[in-house]
Image: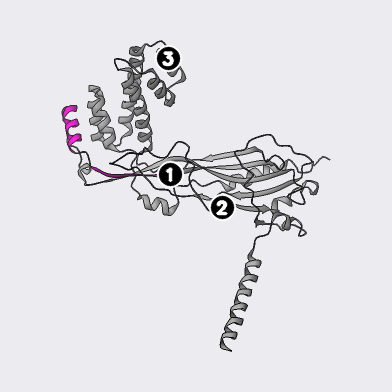
Amino acid sequence: MKNALSLLLLLALLCGLSLNAAADAMPTIDQVLSAGELPNESIEVSDDLSEYDPDALGEVDYGTLQLIILTRAAPEKEYTKLDSGYPDSMVDGFPDDYSGVDLGAPRVWLRCDLMRQLPSQYRAASLAEADVLIIAENEYVWAGTLVNTTYEDSAGDQEPPEFETTEELREWLAAHSPRIESICYYPKFGVYSLINLYDTGTKTCTPFDYLYTQPLRFAKNPEASDQWENMTVLLRLLQEAAQDTPDAQAISAALEEIDFVTDTKKAVWSSCLEAQEYSTLFLSADEVFWDMAEALRLMDPSTDNQANYRNIIDAQDYGTLYLFAEYCEYSSFDRSIESIGLSKDYLADYDTDWMEAKLQEFLSFFAPDPQS
């Protein structure tokens, strides 16, 4: 008897769970549209709209303008840790085609509140009847890498004393270079806020408007970090142009990366490369390099660092400049790599206010003519 009672209680519990699960299940787009008057709210729906890809650009056939308005939230991206393999090997960051790892699946809402604003002749009665889906959505894109370097000791924490020559500074930097224990990478993601129009027949997408938001910068001196990064590209070009037998392909690759000089200057350098006038190319690029070094000096708030830069620039000492700029670690950051992940600050925030304003702008095209 006791076993039979236990079995009945278990069955009742399972039935209750099944009923609750059914009650909590999300409706489909068609179920909401067919339920009568639309409520003045957004309703999350269960439809899988993965075949509607914002990257599948193409023309949209508006047909008879039977429309459905939706909001779609992309899944967040994983805060993926990539070990460089240092010191046994060295992976230089994420691959160029990296797109991140999705955490979960997209979520979709039927914008009943906005559908109510459409004149009734433009409201599709079902997904099958719709000519066009208007989707306000977001898309995360890989937009940078956080480099987390750990050291074996604190040799690099000592402040350099005053030096009379750049040779003394270079010797001190070499002696006090911290010993690296490991190097790991973590991705950052920018985000597009999008208003897209999708053809339900071809599944192609035509953007109505978009807004891009950069991820946060964590560098302690972002301006100097960008300046030094650009200078390292220019330094590669100078090194190649100074060779006894310059590698034209390597110089061309460096030129491709340079977007921080005027188009006129870059055109001159390209002409020098084509004419194999490597000495002229070197002299012109070298002048720009040391002008950039002077700008970098002024971006450093430390008067001691500025004094060291002054000596390096006066001596035009490439090697010491490289060691000292690397020592300054402009791209380093004070926050722990863990806190950035926990706060999700590695993800840019998409602009919901902007998206709502653009949806209203789109709806204004369907507003009745006040003069009619």
Image mark for residue 81? none
Task: Name which of mark 3 and mark 1 comes first in the sequence.
Answer: 1
Residue occupying the point 61% across, 82% down = 8
Describe the element under mark 1 as helix, strand or loop. strand
Task: Name which of mark 1 and mark 2 comes first in the sequence.
Answer: 2
Image mark for residue 187? 1
**Answer yes or no: do the residues labelled 2 and 3 have beta carbons within 8 Å?**
no
Residue picked out by circle 3: 268
In this view of the protein, which residue sits in the foreground, 229 or 25?
25
Task: Give the percent coordinates (x, y) of residue 299.
Answer: 33, 33
| Pointer 1 local density, CA inside 10 Å: few below 14, some 14–19, many at least 20 | many
| Pointer 3 local density, CA inside 10 Å: few below 14, some 14–19, many at least 20 | some
Which quarter of the rendered picture does the C terminus lie within?
top right
**Residue 326: which quarter of the image?**
top left
Name which residue type carries label 1.
Pro
Which quarter of the rendered picture does the N terminus lie within?
bottom right
Name which residue type carries label 3.
Val
Q: Which residues are magenta?
A: 163-188
Name which residue type carries label 2.
Ala
Describe the element under mark 2 as helix, strand or loop. loop
Residue picked out by circle 2: 105
From the image, state whether disc 1 or disc 2 is nearer to you: 2
Task: Give the percent coordinates (x, y) of residue 54.
Answer: 61, 41
